[in-house]
Structure formats: structure tokens, C-alpha cells
Image: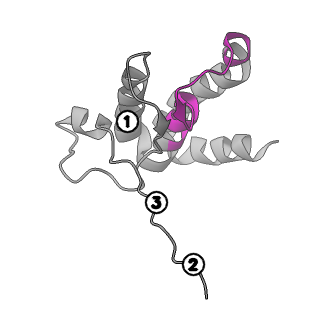
Amino acid sequence: MTPRWRDLARTALRAPAATALRIPIFAYRYSLSMFMGRRCRYLPTCSEYADEAIARHGAWAGGWMAAGRICRCHPWSGSGYDPPPSELPSRASWSRPWRYAKRANSPVCEVAEPAD
């Protein structure tokens, strides 16, 4: 088994709802995605983002994050590096799930000083 499948198998017993959402993502990634071509505007791809968000934040918050990312992925949208957040947004709650889906600020790379 690949490490991803082992991770999914371990999660299945702890979080069945998250596993139920992650299985169709794996099925899409390893079947339909190959035939459609890989032309995602963002990195990581939408399926990788959804899988990581659900694994990290659970079915409810991660599912809303994935739905927001899929809605942002269209030809008139931006592009670039957009990872799932490592922490839940501060203003999000279960009763206001749309706040999970807001895009995080893009990471900023700092310029390193040259060594002497």
C-alpha cells in the first residue's frame, strides 16, 4: 500500500465522515483526472488541497475549505500557490461555514541577507 492509502486506512476508524469524503477524491485523482489532463491553476491541485484540508481539519471545516477552493478554480480567477491553512480561521464557526472557505493570504517569501 502507498503511504496515502495507509493514511486513509488509519483515518477510517477515527473519522468515518472524513474518510467518506476522501474516498471520492482518491477515486477522482487516480481515474478521471488522468483522462481530463492536469491543468489546475493552483498548486497544490484542487484534489490535493481537498484531501489535505479534510485530513487536517475534519469533514465539516475541510469540506467547506475544499468547496471554496473548487469555486475559486475557474478561468477568471487567480492562480499560484494556495495551500490549505494550517489553522482554522479565527472568525469561522460551525454555524457560519462559509468563513472556512475564504482564501488565506498568500505566503510572502522574505529576502535572505547574503552571507559574508
Q: How is the image coloured?
A: one colour
User: Which mark is in front, 3 or 1?
Assistant: 3
Circle 2: residue type: Pro
Q: Which residue is mark 1?
A: 65
Spot occupied by residue 15 in the image (x, y as percentages of width and height): 49, 43
Disc 3 and disc 2: Cα gap in Å? 15 Å
Q: Amino acid at mark 1?
A: Met
- Looking at the rendering, the stretch of residues picked out in magenta corresponds to 33-52
For residue 109, the mark is 3
Relative horizontal placement of residue 1, taking residue 85 as reference (left or right)? right
Residue at horizontal 65 percent and vertical 28 percent from the top: 26
Q: Residue furthest right?
A: 1
Foreground pick, 65 / 14: 65
Tell me if residue 40 is in the magenta stretch: yes
Depth check, mark 3 against mark 2: the one in front is 2
Q: Quadrant of the N terminus?
A: top right
Element on which disc 2 rests: loop
Residue corresponding to mark 2: 114
Q: How packed is label 2: few (under 14 Cα within 10 Å), some, or many (20 or more)?
A: few
Q: Quadrant of the C terminus?
A: bottom right
